[in-house]
Image (spheres, coloured by chain):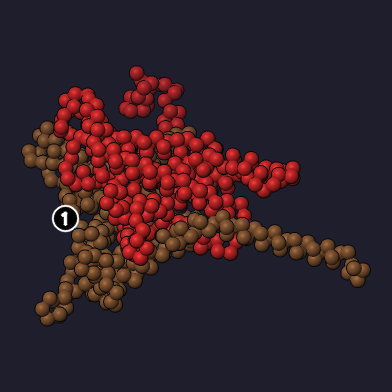
Amino acid sequence: MAERTPTQTPATVASPDPAAPPPRRRRRMKDLRKQPGFDTMAWFCLFCLYAPIAVLVVFSFNDNRSVVRWTEFSLRWYRAAFENDGIRHATWISLQVAFVAMVFATTFATMAALATTRVRAFKGQTLTYAVINQPLMVPEIVTAVSTLAFFVLIKQVTGLNGIGFLMLAHTVFCIPFAYMPIRARLEDMNLTLEQAAADLYGTPFQVFRTVTLPLMAPGIVAGAMLAFVVSLDDVIITLLVGGPGETTLPVYIFGQIRRGITPEINAVSTVLLGLSALLVSIFFLIGNKRK
Amino acid sequence: MTDVTPQTATDARLAEARRQTMGAARRRRWQLLSPALLIIGLFGLFPLTITLVYSFLSPGSYGGVRWEFSTDAYVQFLFDRDIFDDTLSFSATYLNIFARSIGLALGATIGSLIIGFPTAYFIASKPANQRNLWLFLITLPFWVNLLIRTYAILLIIRDEGIINLSLIWTGLIDQPIGILYTDTAIFIGLIYSYLPFMVLPLYASLEKLDFRLVEAAYDLYASRLQVLRHVIVPMAKPGIVAGCILVFIPALGAYITPDLLGGGKQLMIGNLIALQFGGSRNWPFGAAAALILMVVVMVSLTVYVRYSGKEGNGRG
């Protein structure tokens, strides 16, 4: 017992236990990095980040109209959401837009990454980076209204219409997100393998297809996933730019929340949340494997 | 043939070949870059110029603009125009919205710093193998839909939400404290939304912290608070600046958070802009407000770039 609390009272200090002083010094050493209350704050931060989401998820399984009082486990709200035509249509639109934006954004980002990494500094480099990252620097609401104004102008002049405009807007802001992981991956690759392939008479296209592309594939997959998630999650730009009938899932949810809260929203939110979390987790796994 | 020595001929040919490869590389580079640059330039940058032009036009009756030059949009910002005699009188309505937005965004920035700094420090002082897990856990919510996170906050701070219910259940209060649809709600929502933006750059600069300096400070009889103030905080300064900018900018332009948690009554700049392009149908005024927001953001970014340039290292 005296060993467990060695230096608490003068009595134990006076005791002839030789093991008493060293633990005390060791404790001081270990505490060096600590600041009082900081670890509590970190756990509190983690709790605050996840507790609201946990409440939302838990009550999506509640067999009750209430989103507060728990009665019984049930999947009825998931069934209700699945049978809801509005939700189905919105999901379909969301997936279409996210898929098209992902394909184009990833392709363009890959090309841009190939041109800007592993090269000597070139004229216009800073400007190039600034342009590629532009969608990240302008507040989303400003992008949204500017794009709206421009699209309305194009639609008036050309008479064109359709969901293509929304896909275009999504492609623009997905490019920087796809670009980041692809560029990071490319920067980790050195040119020796490609040079070896070229020495063995590989044509530039062969070298790219059989050496560069497979090596940078994890970066491309990661970039595509980020682009998909970012497109899938967008509300503001879609809300303003999307025409009638172009309601994506988040925009649909947004409208529903404004009208009133139902557990059905919890169910759809949980599905969307799960999908994003899954894709981002895979993204992190790919990133960690690299190191 | 014979009047040129073999040496110079080779040189010339080499130089020519080099010029050709360089030229080919340059052409290839711009070919690869052109789709991304064109798309962002045409549909990301160019629309901003349209917004600039629109802010100097007159509003159309059913939304859109009439092509007549006018500075009304900017005048409207500070003055009320009397409908009958066209006289201008000072009005602080919109100025107040801007001031409120900046206040809320600053508050959220400071709030995130207070929560984020200890968290980032805690992660940085963890063993390397645990850090990645912590970073992942902090970042994950950021990738989850902002709307859904805001909805989650709305669920728990409602009058019938879990916070009020548990407070009533414990007997601390008898009536729900109305948090939803107040500035407090927006404040909580903003911190919740952008906290990861604060933690990541803070972590990036705290991770590089040399704990031998902390040790040295303790050896010189510094108290914990003194170590924090004179050693840790100064070394984390680039991270603090980066984190503050990264939280402040999106918080200032927030739209979803004030819309859902402020109930649309407590406007922020983002809502004001969207409103002009929607229900209010005053595009020039909305465009002007958007540009003013852009200017505030650009000024903050410039301050950040200047600062991080001087410090040598910026965000991680």
Which residue is rendered at x = 24% and y = 33% of the image?
A: A83
Does B48 appear above or below A186? below
Q: Which residue is mark 1?
A: B265
Q: Relative to the observer, which residue lies in front, B191 or A75?
A: A75
Pick out the residue farthest to the top: A1
Q: Relative to the observer, which residue lies in front, B153 or A264?
A: A264
Q: Residues within 10 Å of mark 1 (few under 14, many from 20)?
A: few
- Place of residue A69 in the rendered image (x, y in percent of width and height, measured from the top left): 15, 30
Q: Relative to the observer, which residue lies in front, B24 or B132?
A: B24
Does A65 appear above or below B240? above
- What chain is the red one? A
Q: State the image quarter where residue B289 is shown.
A: bottom left
Which residue is rendered at x = 24% and y = 65% of the image?
A: B63
- Place of residue B132 in the rendered image (x, y in percent of width and height, measured from the top left): 45, 37
Q: Amino acid at mark 1?
A: Lys
Which residue is rendered at x = 45% and y = 35% of the image?
A: A282
The N terminus of chain A sits in image quarter: top left
